[in-house]
Amino acid sequence: MRSFLFNLCFYGFTALVAIACLPLTYLNSPKPVAAVLHWWAKGIVWLLHNVAGIRLEVRGHENIPAAGPSLIASKHQSFSDGILVLSLLPNIATVAMKDLLDYPAIGRILTKLDMIMVDTCGGGTERNKLSTAARRAFDNDRHILIYPEGQLVPVGDRERYKIGIYHLYTDLNLPVTPVATNVGLCWQCRAWRKTPGTAVLSFLEPIRTGLDKDTFMRVLEDTIEAETARLVGEAA
């Protein structure tokens, strides 16, 4: 029953916010849309807690970038990952699949927000698109959120980390804040059913600039995967 009520509230609330945002996309500034979506994300966190019985716990507050530009690399277990981060950090530019642009309302809102839309298959052209869009976010002092695995990964599984994060790390000369999570235990990937519990977002110590590719990729993956496994084991 909790899952049914939450999904009803989630999709209803999201649809209303999307409709409300559409007129705002015609304004010159994207700030009103960004402010509404930050408020929407906070509302979803409230619904998770009070309807689905999923409490958000944030660890490593001292590692959350106080201001942009910043580069954040997160484990991606659930559809809710980006929502939870957005509730904490407004005006964030998320690296997402360009397929989302095919949805009329969502596509228009994402375009207005200048999100970083890429083809996850990669290639030289996509790397250039990623670099150009990330540079715009950097120039506007925005946080940049990227999922190094490039896709949703169920709890207990892992995918090869893609080197797009390394290119951003070197092109922008920014430290990278790794984020581990166990949210997939409560909201698995795109699953309809939600499981009450505590969803943890753990912001870890930033990885300093200047590392070579092999070292950086190894440190990033080991750091995120080790802390994610620890959080999953702790919840179990």
Image: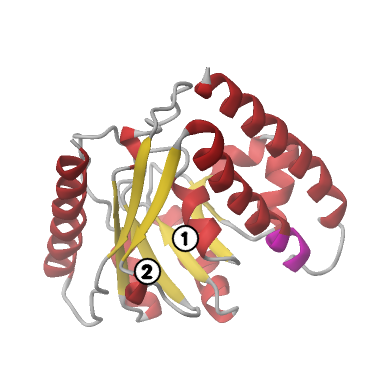
The answer to if 191 sits in the magenta stretch is no
Q: Residue at x 57, y 29 (%)?
A: 6
**Residue 137 appears in which quarter of the rendering?**
bottom right
Give the overall secondary structure of the magenta segment: helix
Q: Residue at x 75, y 40 (%)?
A: 105
Residue type highlighted by circle 2? Leu
- Label 1: which residue? 130
Q: Residue at x 41, y 43 (%)?
A: 120
Q: Which label is found at residue 168?
A: 2
Residue 37 spot, x, y in % from top left: 67, 54
Measure how far apart labels 1 and 2 are at the Cα level. Answer: 8 Å
Of residues 112 and 192, which is closer to you in this image? 192
User: Which type of secondary structure does the marked residue at label 2 adopt?
Assistant: helix
* Residues tagged 1 and 2 counted as in contact (Cβ below 8 A): yes
Residue type highlighted by circle 1? Leu
Q: Looking at the picture, does residue 198 appear above or below residue 188?
A: below
Residue 169 spot, x, y in % from top left: 32, 72
Residue 130 spot, x, y in % from top left: 47, 60
Q: Looking at the picture, does residue 94 appear above or below residue 98?
A: below
Q: Earlier in the sequence, mark 1 or mark 2?
A: 1
**Residue 215 appears in which quarter of the rendering?**
bottom left
Quadrant holding the C terminus? top left
Q: Residues within 10 Å of mark 1 (few under 14, many from 20)?
A: many
Of residues 85 and 136, which is closer to you in this image? 85
Q: Is residue 209 left or right of residue 5?
A: left
Count how many numbered circles sit on residues in the image: 2
The span picked out in magenta is 31-35
How has the structure been colored for display?
A: secondary structure
